[in-house]
Image (spheres, coloured by chain):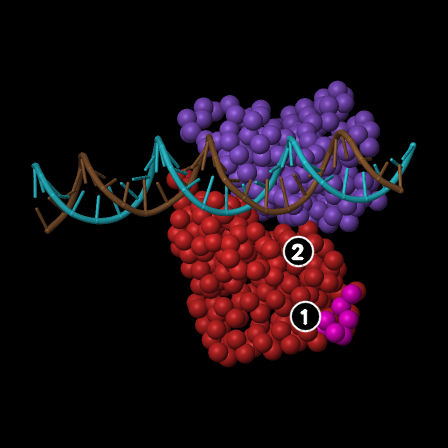
Chain colours: A red, B purple, C brown, D cyan
Amino acid sequence: MTTISTRPIETAAHDRLYRTLRQQIMHGELMPGQALTLRGLGKQFGVSMTPAREALRRLVAEGALMLSSSGRVTTPELSNERIEELAALRALIEPELASRALPRAHLALIDRLSAINTANAEAVAKQDAVAYIRTNLEFHRTLYLRAQAPAMLAVIETIWLQLGPTMRALYTKLRRNEPPRHHRMILAALRAGDEPGLRLAVRTDVTQGLRHLAG
Amino acid sequence: MTTISTRPIETAAHDRLYRTLRQQIMHGELMPGQALTLRGLGKQFGVSMTPAREALRRLVAEGALMLSSSGRVTTPELSNERIEELAALRALIEPELASRALPRAHLALIDRLSAINTANAEAVAKQDAVAYIRTNLEFHRTLYLRAQAPAMLAVIETIWLQLGPTMRALYTKLRRNEPPRHHRMILAALRAGDEPGLRLAVRTDVTQGLRHLAG
DNA sequence: CATGCGCCCATGTGATCACAAATCGCGCGC
DNA sequence: GCGCGCGATTTGTGATCACATGGGCGCATG
């Protein structure tokens, strides 16, 4: 229909839509319970229903969105039980990823993690929920990328995705006013090469936030 | 096999296709590297490309199928590294699911698990790879259903799905001639209410098969 | 004023078509 | 005999359309 501009990278329409929505969901930019329609998204992104349908169904398959019995797609409103489960999964998988990253975590990586942590603190200072969530996840992902475990990383990212919409609610409910102190413990354990300490730091960092919401 | 109940619900075409393919993949009925085309599947199931595309993309999103850069869809040929990762994920998550199921595992459940195990032994005797894989997974799923943890169960099922096509290859390579002896250990631990023993039995049962292939 | 009923529009589903790109095979040339 | 290139066919992508359904809103009725 409207293929006019020269595109630097030829990315399929449904894929752009998917990536955009995925990021919005993971970063908590969409409120729980929000409805998404095929024609609405299509019009918004200048495409037809077909790519919109693909993007939505893909996100539904990953658990990022909920599909009602009539086919309506909304962001999920998680029950406390489900939040507890997802937190438990994070607590199981993320220490393993951190542990696998540890042997490959050199100074350059630790410096980058520190920088992300600084940006995270700035987001806290500015009360910017989206930036807080984004930098927080970026901290973890940057570390886990070193684990060279793409399948595990993919699993943990789909779990982050499922938690996305409630993360925002969690942030406002907790009225966070300090950056996660466990990030510093993670960095310390990385520097010291302390594998059990690293596992513990990651596990507590992951659990502490979610525990408040579920409890 | 276990679903006898009348299904008055009119299931959408793409969903039937999805379920059929998903089961075939998880049970190892499709060989690794096999290609699936939209028009081919559509003709095979008497539908157009649209439902076929949805089913395929959904399976791709779950990691059950691979999507080449040109959009071709095939069953994955897993690298040893990926198999090791998926095995590690099973070893992390499944003991947790078993542990959560333990308090609710009454005699009726243990009896049903025993029956499934018997069917599994018959599949071994008949050298029926698909039946072996199916009963093996049914053993685990029946146990984990008692954990009342749908999110965890969903995650572990997508991991089974990813391992599906290589399970078949694994089976023929190992020339299995006995049912998994760890299933008996799992049952014993369940009867004794031995939580550490159960975790260990599940972990070893899950790991032992995959370790041979990856190693 | 409350409640239930019915109609209309919004929305998902699936089919079909036009198009582009990739793939395969055949034939030509070396 | 072998390799390269070109063309036909296969295949994915996206748009559009017809259709069924479900939800929402207003109107009528008790």
Given the image, on which type of amino acid does mark 2 rest? Answer: Leu
Q: Nearer the viewer, residue A177 or A10?
A: A10
Separation of residues labelled 1 and 2 (CA atoms):
18 Å
Q: Is residue B207 above or below residue B142?
A: below
State the residue position of label 2: A153
Left or right of residue A30, residue B60 in this image:
right
Callout 1: chain: A
Left or right of residue B104, residue A144 in this image:
right
Given the image, on which type of amino acid does mark 1 rest? Answer: Ile
User: In terms of sequence position, does the residue under pointer 1 or pointer 2 come before the other?
Assistant: 2
Circle 2 packing at 10 Å, graded few (<14), some (14-19), many (20+), is some
Res B171 quadrant in image: top right
Callout 2: chain: A
State the residue position of label 1: A186
* Residue at figure coordinates x 68%, y 70% from the top left: A186
Is residue B1 in view from this perspective?
Answer: yes
Start and end of the magenta stretch? A104-110
Q: Secondary structure at mark 2?
A: helix
Q: x and y percent of residue B157 in the render?
A: 61, 41
Q: Nearer the viewer, residue C23 or B143?
A: C23
Q: Secondary structure at mark 1?
A: helix
